[in-house]
Image (spheres, rainbow, N blue to C red):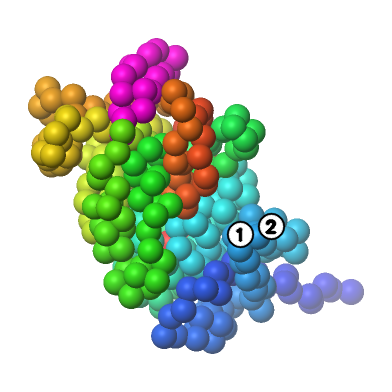
Amino acid sequence: MTDTSSPSPKRAAVVINPAKTVDIDVRELMAKHCEENGWGETLWFETTEEDPGVGQAKEALAQGADLIIAAGGDGTVRCVAEVLAGGDIPMGLLPLGTGNLLARNLGIDVTDYDGALSGALVGTERKIDVVRARRNDPDKEQVFLVMAGMGYDATIMADTNQELKHKVGWLAYVDAGIRNLPGKPVKATVVIDGKRAVHRGVRSVMVGNCGKVQGGLEIFPEAKVDDGLLDIAVLAPHHGKLGWLSVLAGIIGKGKNKDTAVEYFQGKSVEITLEHKDDYQLDGDHEGQGKHVLMTMEPGALTLRM
């Protein structure tokens, strides 16, 4: 007898943050694209406050998903990537958040939901870098794709007014940034690729895998999501009311002047140790406080379809 059975159609899973409301029916739009492109019925998993995406992505893999689409903001994307990094299953992006910084850095139109879903199902695959961040206070390893930091930048994430964020989007971060401009530096030791690069008082140490942040501001002018390098920025404003202007000038000047208000470095690993605990963030999510983290680059560890 001849075997006339055909292979089962591919199935996509969507890990979606239900708190991100948009003016489209995501499930209906996904069903349309799956039908048009010969994909089977979609698996759906909603994130929760207790589990913002890691458990859902693991369950999607356990159920045999051929593709996992992260539908939410950068936090949802980061959690799905944590599960898929180092594996063969690709990730798609449906940007539904306020920042959507990974999507923006990749040149994805964050308002084109049709294009995002079509690209995830039948688009081109590319490898991007993933950064592993291990803390020992508490002992915890996570990944990030856009940017992490200790100090002032993380304090902004912790102190952003969520109600204002819903009303005006990323401008709410500006409000938090202005309110937190006053503050004391913390003594930091920054070791890059095993060599000490910084040992002084700073307000923030930021580590980037991408260059652009909220409002299109380019913090890391040389950062590329697939160059195998971490980009590190150390912010140490001069004393006085105009101290932060020196930081702004350093960022605008892309760190090419000799002013130590902003110093840029590159490397494959960075270890940050603070004299006392300060705020800590990964891809815009405040992750509490800490005083030590080791970040290491994993080149090309994540497959994106877009």
Residue furthest toward the right?
Answer: 1
* CB under 8 Å between discs 2 and 1: yes
Q: Which residues are magenta?
A: 185-203
Which residue position holds label 1? 53
Secondary element type, mark 1: loop
Mark 1 residue crowding within 10 angstroms, few (<14) / some (14–19) / many (20+): many
Label 2, label 1: how far apart the Cα atoms are: 6 Å
Residue at the location (51% across, 35% down)?
A: 290
For this orientation, the residue located farthest to the top is 195
Density class for disc 2 (Cα within 10 Å; few <14, some 14-19, many ≥20) is some
In the rendered image, the vertical position of residue 32 relative to residue 259, given as above or below: below
Asked whether residue 125 is in view, the answer is no
Measured as percent of width and height from the top left, residue 11 is found at 65, 70
Quadrant of the frame with the C terminus: bottom left
Residue 138 quadrant: top right
Amino acid type, residue under disc 1 in the picture:
Gly
> Image point 65% across, 70% down: which residue?
45
Image point (44%, 41%), residue name: 279
**Quadrant location, the N terminus:** bottom right
Is residue 194 part of the magenta span, yes or no?
yes
Q: Nearer the viewer, residue 197 or 80?
A: 197
Q: Position of residue 155 (x, y in %)?
A: 38, 46
Q: Residue 16 location in percent, x, y?
A: 56, 70
Q: Is residue 64 left or right of residue 213?
A: right
Say which residue label 2 marks: 55
Identify the disc placed on residue 2.
none
| Majority SS type along the magenta span | strand
**Numbered disc 2: secondary structure:** helix
Depth check, front residue: 131 or 276: 276
Q: Is residue 167 above or below residue 50?
A: below
Q: Residue at 31% across / 63% down in the picture?
A: 172
